């Protein structure tokens, strides 16, 4: 299917190191080569770079590395098409405006027989189950709230809507409005929170390491969320199956269900998850 | 203020030659250096490249020339800020989805005391009069039509809404859904339709010329719309003040009012218009 990458930070941060490893899975170290997209919130505005060619070699992906963009919320996706042709209209992340904010969405999974009724506020442009789910999700929010609700109310609503969509199949997703980053895990989603004391990180997909101590300020805090860990010398956490989490300023501020001491055994989790990729 | 550039063609065409001249006005041959944006329809999908740095030198504008993108509908804008800070959220073209299509909009002008009521369907993210006008325009369309109307009905509605917005000030604008390109001229908008027999064109802003006969097929037809002509050896037409036109497949299919034999004297028109830039 696809892989997801997202970043949520308390200070504008570039994603070059993580993206360097991630993009190699788009045609080099893995087979997610049906296009890619990455979107950066720059204050309330959004910059999106997308391509239908493989992320590992796309000149639009080169731009991410050549012109590092600092952002507090970034959503990226490499695609292995299941539904919908390899076209720009079917390329994640998708974007819509709701309550005077842009919203970005990316999905890993596959929904079957998912045909929500035509929306009043949001309608898909392309032919993917993913964009249909995104439009349905925003439609439900907009039908319920004329103005943006507080974070706890929004989080509860998102968790409930994801639970409904889940009835149709695999649905790991990322959603951001530039303030918070919502993640729902159906099968496989990892995250790491980097904060002081910062150390060295080494990519899994390339012979590259970075010492974050040289790149950061003491108060920086950055959460990176990815389908599979991007580094092989750090301790990534795995979101539980059916878990939703809301990240803000580089940390989790809400999660549902609350963390349980019994996480799925990592080996079994990884096996299940890789079968779904 | 700003300058507009748009292209509508009957076959996917790249805009590199026109954009090469246009971008120089963003900081080199003219002072529209508060950012730029260019958006390409690729089938129903959209690729947007934007920057808050001057178009003449932005690496994102370099991409347009380095990776020529073929499209039948392109909207571009170089900004000289009047309302709203120089941020990405205030950078044209703006995009929204309506009736399951993306819509792109760019504006040259300045609207005063333009504060439409909060929309049900569309709300601005940034702080420009331009995005407020775009949202108001789509809001009016969506309130009136639950599904996309035919072209004549749509054109009549757009012309009427532009007439209302015009009460607040200068409003030259471009709007496209990837099928047609709507242009409204409040003061200054030129166009040229290139078709067989194709000839040589020479940029006004750079020492560059191209022989379109070498770049085209006999049935190609391309309309280029720009605030001011981009070439100095071709005959550009000027839209009349208060005129709206709908381009499709590289030609004008509807205009309102119908073309009059008495166009404003070009010198007076140019003087009025340059005062408004």
Image (tube, coloured by chain):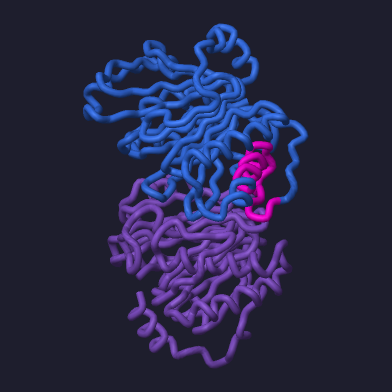
Chain colours: A blue, B purple
Q: In this view of the protein, can residue B217 be seen by the observer?
A: no
Q: Residue furthest right?
A: A113
Q: Name above or below for residue A58 compared with residue B167.
A: above
x, y percentage for residue A246? 47, 33
Q: Name above or below for residue B256 compared with residue B74.
A: below
x, y percentage for residue A191? 45, 22
Q: In this view of the protein, can residue A24 be seen by the observer?
A: yes
Locate the N terminus of chain A and report the quarter of the image it occupies.
top right
Q: How many marks on residues?
A: 0
Q: Is residue B158 magenta?
A: no
> Which residue is found at the position 41% from the left and 50% from the top?
A45
> Which residue is found at the position 70% from the left and 69% from the top?
B151
Among the 4 quarters of the image, the one containing residue B193: bottom right
Q: Looking at the image, which is closer to me, B193 or A244? A: A244
Q: Is A238 left, or right, of A120 in this rendering?
A: left
Q: Name above or below for residue B263 compared with residue A220.
A: below
Q: Is residue A133 magenta?
A: yes
x, y percentage for residue A136? 65, 44
User: What range of the chain is rendered magenta?
Assistant: A119-139
Among the 4 quarters of the image, the one containing residue A276: top right
x, y percentage for residue A164? 68, 34
Q: Looking at the image, which is closer to me, B49 or A275? A: A275
Q: Is A39 left, or right, of B137 in this rendering?
A: left
> Which residue is found at the position 34% from the left and 53% from the top?
B52
């Amino acid at each position: 299917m696809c892989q997801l990458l997202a970043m949520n930070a308390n200070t504008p941060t570039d994603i070059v190191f993580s993206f360097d490893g991630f993009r190699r899975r788009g045609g080099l170290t893995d087979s997610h080569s049906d296009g890619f997209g990455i979107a950066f919130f720059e204050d309330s505005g959004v910059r999106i770079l997308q391509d239908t060619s493989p992320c590992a070699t796309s000149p639009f992906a080169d731009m991410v590395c050549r012109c590092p963009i600092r952002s507090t919320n970034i959503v990226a996706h490499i695609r292995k098409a299941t539904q919908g042709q390899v076209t720009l209209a079917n390329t994640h992340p998708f974007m819509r405006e709701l309550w005077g904010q842009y919203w970005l969405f990316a999905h890993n999974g596959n929904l079957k027989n998912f045909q929500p009724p035509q929306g009043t506020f949001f309608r898909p442009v392309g032919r993917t189950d993913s964009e249909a789910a995104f439009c349905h999700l925003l439609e439900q929010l907009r039908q319920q709230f004329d103005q943006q609700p507080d974070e706890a109310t929004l989080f509860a609503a998102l968790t409930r809507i994801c639970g409904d969509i889940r009835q149709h199949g695999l649905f790991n997703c990322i959603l951001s409005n530039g303030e918070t980053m919502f993640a729902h895990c159906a099968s496989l989603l990892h995250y790491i929170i980097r904060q002081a004391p910062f150390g060295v990180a080494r990519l899994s997909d390339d012979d590259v390491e970075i010492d974050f101590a040289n790149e950061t300020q003491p108060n920086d805090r950055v959460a990176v969320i990815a389908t599979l860990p991007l580094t092989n010398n750090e301790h990534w956490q795995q979101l539980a199956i059916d878990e939703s989490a809301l990240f803000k300023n580089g940390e989790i501020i809400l999660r549902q269900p609350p963390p349980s001491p019994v996480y799925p055994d990592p080996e079994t989790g990884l096996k299940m998850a890789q079968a779904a990729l």
